[in-house]
Amino acid sequence: MILKWSDFASANLIEIRDYLAKTSLSYAAQLSSRILQRSEDLSLFPLFGAEVPEYRRYGIRELYEHPYRILYVVDGDTIQILTVVHSARRLPIAPPITR
């Protein structure tokens, strides 16, 4: 399986890291690393995450890396990370899917 991060998701992760780095560089680095590792696990188990109820019709799935949700879609042999969002925040109305 090929793992791809959308530009939107990459920007989300950078924003998260930069925000957390204001108070703790080590926590920001650790959490960013955990999110990346969690997403890489999808290469072995692409359907591991549950379907996102808010997006069921789009086939969007999610993994949690507390306190963040990693939203992704499986398309053939490609896994596309769509966004990373704090679990306390509302999800975007329509996540950007590039195919």
Image (cartoon, helix red, strand yellow):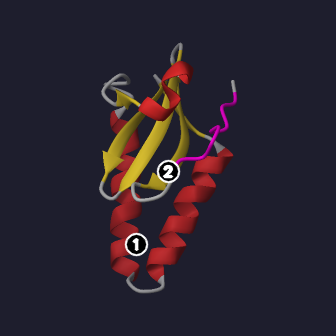
Q: Whole-percent x and y of residue 82? A: 57, 39
The tag on residue 60 is none
Q: Left or right? Give the position of 51 relative to 58.
A: left
Q: Is residue 46 left or right of residue 54?
A: left
Q: Is residue 4 above or below residue 67?
A: above
Q: Disc 1 and disc 2: Cα gap in Å?
A: 14 Å
In the displayed structure, 16 sits above or below 56; it is below
Which residue type carries mark 2? Val
In this view, which residue lies farthest toward the bottom?
23
Whichever of callouts 1 and 2 sits on the residue coming sooner in the sequence is 1
Give the quadrant of the C terminus.
top right
Q: Secondary structure at mark 2?
A: strand
What residue is disc 2 on?
Answer: 84
Magenta segment range?
91-98
- Residue toward you, 76 or 19: 19
Image coordinates of residue 65 in percent, x first then y, are 32, 51
Q: Is 61 inside the magenta-drawn segment?
A: no
Q: Check if residue 97 falls in the magenta segment.
A: yes
Residue, x 67% and y 38% (percent of image)? 96
Disc 1 target residue: 28
